[in-house]
Amino acid sequence: MSIRKYLSTAPLFNITRYESEEDFAQDCIAFEGAPKKHPYDPDKLLLIIKPFSSNTTFYEFRVKDIRHAENLPSIVTDAGSNLFMARIWIRRGSMGVKYEPFEVSDTIKFYHDSELLHQVFSERE
């Protein structure tokens, strides 16, 4: 499956809002980004960190590991479209997957170390 499919515009993942006085910092870790519905697994959520950056990273979490979600200010593009942002509190000890672009070579080079990836992403902008 292509990475473009993960990053394509799709309906937002609906998060149920509720008020709580519980302190989630004790047993959870907060992640901030744009939540998206997983393209083929309804039990998972994708969270895109810095969605309009050329160095976009995203996380995959199981929905059942989300303890709480908070609305953050939305991001508005130059074209006027609105992107919902949220802070997601994930239970400590849960398993997540981090997707990050890298250059395939003898030594793996991540975006911040790779001149090739900088060139590829700047050509797209």
Image (tube, helix red, strand yellow):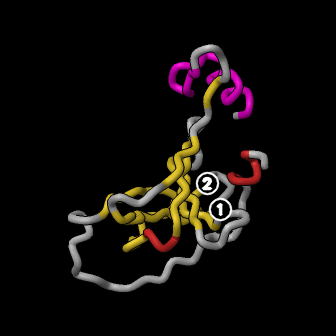
- Dividing the picture into quadrants, the one containing residue 125 is top right
In x, y percent, where is residue 122?
67, 27
Is residue 109 found inside the magenta-colored segment of the image?
yes
Identify the residue shown where x is 57% and y is 38%.
100
Q: Main secondary structure of the magenta part?
A: helix
- Residue type at mark 2: give it: Thr
In x, y percent, where is residue 121?
67, 30
Identify the residue shown where x is 35% and y is 58%.
93
Q: Residue 65 carries which label?
A: none
Residue named by callout 1:
81
Residue named by callout 2:
77
Query: Compared with residue 107, is residue 75 higher up or lower down, i.e. above or below?
Result: below
Residue 13 in the figure: left or right of residue 10: left
- Residue type at mark 1: give it: Ser
Q: Which residue lies furthest to the bottom in this view?
A: 18
Choose between 74 and 1: the one closer to the eye: 1
In x, y percent, where is residue 25?
24, 63
C-alpha distance separating marks 1 and 2: 5 Å
Region rendered in magenta: 108-124
Identify the residue shown where x is 52% and y is 19%.
113
C-beta proximity under 8 Å, tags 1 and 2: yes
Label 1 secondary element: loop
Identify the residue shown where x is 44% and y is 69%.
65
Decide: few, some or many residues near mark 2? Use Cα within 10 Å; few <14, some 14-19, many ≥20.
few
Query: Compared with residue 5, is residue 62 higher up or lower down, i.e. above or below?
Result: below
In x, y percent, where is residue 91?
36, 65
Residue 51 in the figure: left or right of residue 3: left
